[in-house]
């Protein structure tokens, strides 16, 4: 049986601890690129695809702003 209900999954990262300073984040969960399945937050503020970050493939995003040690990134996966 296939799950048809919407669901939400969150990954949290701290730059310098979890993520190197190359602005690329390799996610542990897959998403469908370009389908608005991600909500990305940078230090608590909403980040926009194409402005603050870009989707490279179905598991990778790259920030277009310079990330600094201690920056907090939250990725919310939404499917439904």
Image: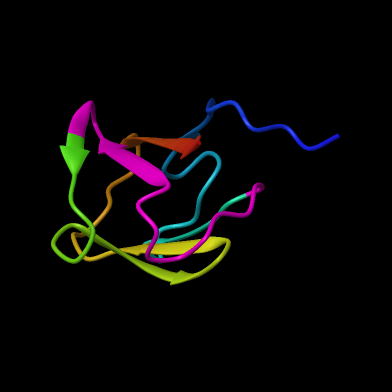
Residue at 32% over, 42% down: 40
Front residue of this view, candidates 17 and 75: 75
Residue at 35% over, 52% down: 36
Is 6 placed above or below 46 here? above
The x and y percentages for residue 21 are 40, 59
Q: Residue furthest right?
A: 1
The x and y percentages for residue 35 are 39, 58
Q: Is residue 11 magenta?
A: no
Q: Residue 70 sits in which quadrant?
A: top left
Horizontal arrangement in the rendering, residue 64 relative to residue 70 (left or right): left
Q: How many marks?
A: 0
Is 51 placed above or below 43 here? below
Tell me the magenta residue range: 28-45
Q: Main secondary structure of the magenta part?
A: loop
Residue at 19% over, 66% down: 50
The x and y percentages for residue 12 are 49, 31
Is 9 placed above or below 73 here? above
Q: Residue 72 sits in which quadrant?
A: top left
Front residue of this view, candidates 34 and 61: 34
Q: Quadrant of the N terminus?
A: top right
Front residue of this view, candidates 17 and 33: 33
Residue at 27% over, 47% down: 68
């Amino acid at each position: 049986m296939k799950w048809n209900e919407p669901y939400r999954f969150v990954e949290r990262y701290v730059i310098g601890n979890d993520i190197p300073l190359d602005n690329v984040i390799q996610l542990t969960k897959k998403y469908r690129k370009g389908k608005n399945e991600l909500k990305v937050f940078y230090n608590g503020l909403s980040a926009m695809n194409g402005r603050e970050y870009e989707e490279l493939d179905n598991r990778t995003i790259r920030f277009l702003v310079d990330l600094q040690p201690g920056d907090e990134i939250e990725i919310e996966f939404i499917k439904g």
